[in-house]
Image (cartoon, rainbow, N blue to C red):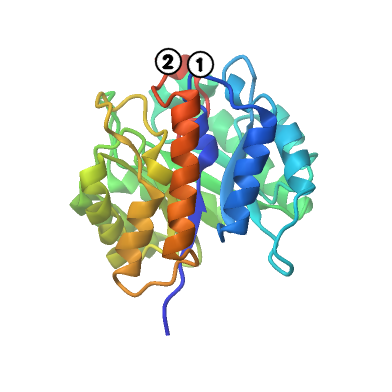
Amino acid sequence: MAENVTIVECPRDAWQGLRQIIPTKEKVHYLSRLLALGFRHIDAVSFVSPKHVPQMADSEEVMQGLGQCQTTPGHTPDIIGIVVNAQGLERALATPGVTTIGYPYSISAYFRRANANMSREETRLLVQKLQNDTKAAGKNLVIYISMAFGNPYDEPWGPEVVEETLVWLKDVGVRIVSLADTVGTASPEDVARLYHASKNAVAGVEIGVHLHSRPEHAPEKVLAAYEAGCRRFDGALTGLGGCPFAGDELVGNIPTEAILTTLSARGVSTGIDTKSLAVACAMTDELREKYSHEPKTIDPMTSPTVN
């Protein structure tokens, strides 16, 4: 019997770096097509300041439009909305159709201060609020550990830092965590090593990966995570979006097609067939062509939703 994995498609991450604003109707059409093609988990919107991320200024309108689209009977899609503060949480919880709240928790003090201007203590208080409020609202919560594989700021880092964070997250009730290689520098060996350590530290917590990579290295990183026990993968079709800090324009999100083909070759059921994948990639290429995939110059001081 084929083993199932969770594939999280991340158009929100992909879109927010585009130079031109995608009209709301086109976002709704694209997301509804993804659902029709079999994508069940979508990082679709974020509830942050339009001043910092103008591409996501219409998140409520996008969700309203998506709610009017037909979905497969018996299959409620998992729609993730990213927040970075209490105000964003309030907006997300008030938006019908958002089933999971996502929050990027940085273990880098510099990155945390630059993105959210918060101390570790303030961030942990926010995480506790996120956990309590999402549970009360019947929503899921996923915490992304930013800089999980190291940072470019010469700050102390090691697997023990990630493990301590995971243990704390489990203690406050968080049950879904994604390890993010924010700067895209982790090798396949790094991915396997950290994942092994992480899953052994917190039994009962679903741990996924949100990796960035050069395209040619993506399959081996996916395989390293899978063989280490990972069953939850974030990706973006055609590798659109990703890390603005890696210093290499080819480093972006892991292409979803690389995840699917790599896992399918191992006999893993992804829920997305070859024909549907081809259609999804063509749709994404069309958006890239129309709205320019050239990334903006992103300053971490003004980009609060980088994983």
Count of marks, rendered view: 2
Between residue 147 and residue 45, name the one nearer to us: 45
Residue at 69 percent of width and 34 percent of height: 25
Q: Are marks 1 and 2 in contact (CB under 8 Å)?
A: yes
Numbered tag placed on residue 171 in the rendering: none
Task: Report which quarter residue 195 is drawn in.
Answer: bottom left
Q: Helix, strand or loop at disc 2?
A: loop
Between residue 146 and residue 244, name the one nearer to us: 244
Please rate how many residues cluster around mark 2, counting C-alpha atoms within 10 Å: few if below 14, some from 14 to 19, many from 20: few
Q: Amino acid at mark 1?
A: Thr
Residue at 77 percent of width and 47 percent of height: 67
| 14 relative position to 73: left or right | left
Q: Residue at label 2?
A: 299
| Rendered location of residue 62, percent (x, y) | 71, 36
Between residue 132 and residue 47, name the one nearer to us: 47
| 60 relative position to 255: left or right | right
| Rendered location of residue 208, percent (x, y) | 43, 55
Residue 270 visible in the picture:
yes
| 143 relative position to 154: left or right | right
Please rate how many residues cluster around mark 1, counting C-alpha atoms within 10 Å: few if below 14, some from 14 to 19, many from 20: some
Q: Measured along the vertical axis of the image, is residue 1 above or below residue 133?
A: below
Q: Amino acid at mark 2?
A: Asp
Task: Report which quarter residue 148 is drawn in.
Answer: top left
Q: Helix, strand or loop at disc 1?
A: helix
